[in-house]
Amino acid sequence: MKTAFLFSGQGSQYPGMGAELAAKFDSAKMILECGSDILGYDLLKKLTDSTAEELAQTRLSQPAIFTVSLLALNTVRENGVENCAVAGHSLGEYAAMYAAGMLTLEDAFKAIKLRSAAMAKAAESTHGAMAAVIGADSAAIEEVCAGVNGYCVPANYNCPVQTVIAGDSAAVDEAVNAFTERKIRCVKLAVSAAFHTKHMESAAAEFKEQIAGFAFGKPNCDFYSNLYGAKMTDFADMPSYLAAHICNPVKFTDELNAMNEAGVEAYVELGPGKVLSGLVRKTLKPAVNTYVENAETLDKALAAING
């Protein structure tokens, strides 16, 4: 069965995530030790002891989610699950790059540390907001965003019935009001920044310079891109790609459709929560759509895959 591994993005974190996988599987020790050395703190302690508020901070949430994604990746591989493709949602692309052999474990953790710091700094210097728009098509959403006073744009094309908008706080509020008047549901997100917009341009420039010397390999499987909404084929300048990735929309719906058209039959989300498996369910009707975040979900996923 042609299987794609999907990797969770920021916002999927919760206290205690990954603790069970860390305790159950020997391979976790290498990941936790490497990450702790590079990040400068005890990763397992952060996963088990941090409050929801602490985990929501970009400087911690990105490394923490990345770590749990790698723990889940190792557990499915130890159980014989193979993949032909990888994709991640925003932050999840870094776990996808590691899974595809494009970055070493050390460089992947270094990249996450630098990225989270740059994005947190950019967030602190801007006054942005994000909101999920539910039940409207992308054309209608783009029309409303273009008509408000100030900067507001689609930032995440998540599935046919959900798009996240982002931009100046006042402009996002105006767009939310416009959708509400049309009886279209909106949910403001608990963030204080407009990720995947021009608000992140300073972070993108800083990060690009910092990773200029990193060695990126070519993927050992198909790699699907948020930036293009399709399988990526040009890996010659990854620092420029990853900088653009920070301040441009996530085209996740297009990625899923592209994987489906390429014959992918099973989608396995690796990392905390089940956000991406929900997006798959709303976009496609694959043979298998499952997720792994602990021992129980691992057993269910293996049963579904080996069915």
Image: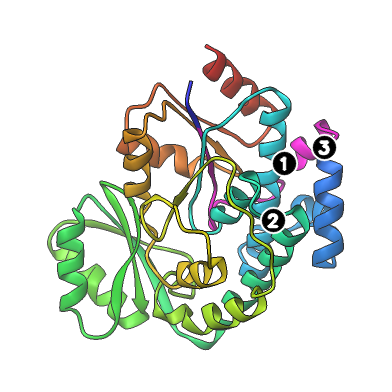
State the CA–CA distance, disc 2 to disc 3. 17 Å
Q: Amino acid at mark 3?
A: Ser
Mark 1 Cα shell of 10 Å, populated few (<14), some (14-19), many (≥20): many
In this view, the mark in front (1 or 2): 1
Residue 303 lies within the magenta run: no
The residue segment tinted magenta is: 4-26
Q: Position of residue 193 (x, y in %)?
A: 47, 75
Query: SS of the residue at dot 2?
Result: helix
Residue at horizontal 18%, vertical 76%? 146
Q: Amino acid at mark 2?
A: Ala
Look at the picture and state if 207 lies above or below 90.
below
Look at the picture and state if 262 lies above or below 210.
above
Give the residue furthest to the top: 307
- Which numbered tag is attached to residue 64? 2
Residue at horizontal 52%, vertical 78%? 204
Colour setting? rainbow
In the foreground, 9 or 254: 254
Residue at horizontal 31%, vertical 34%? 261
- Which numbered tag is attached to residue 27? 3
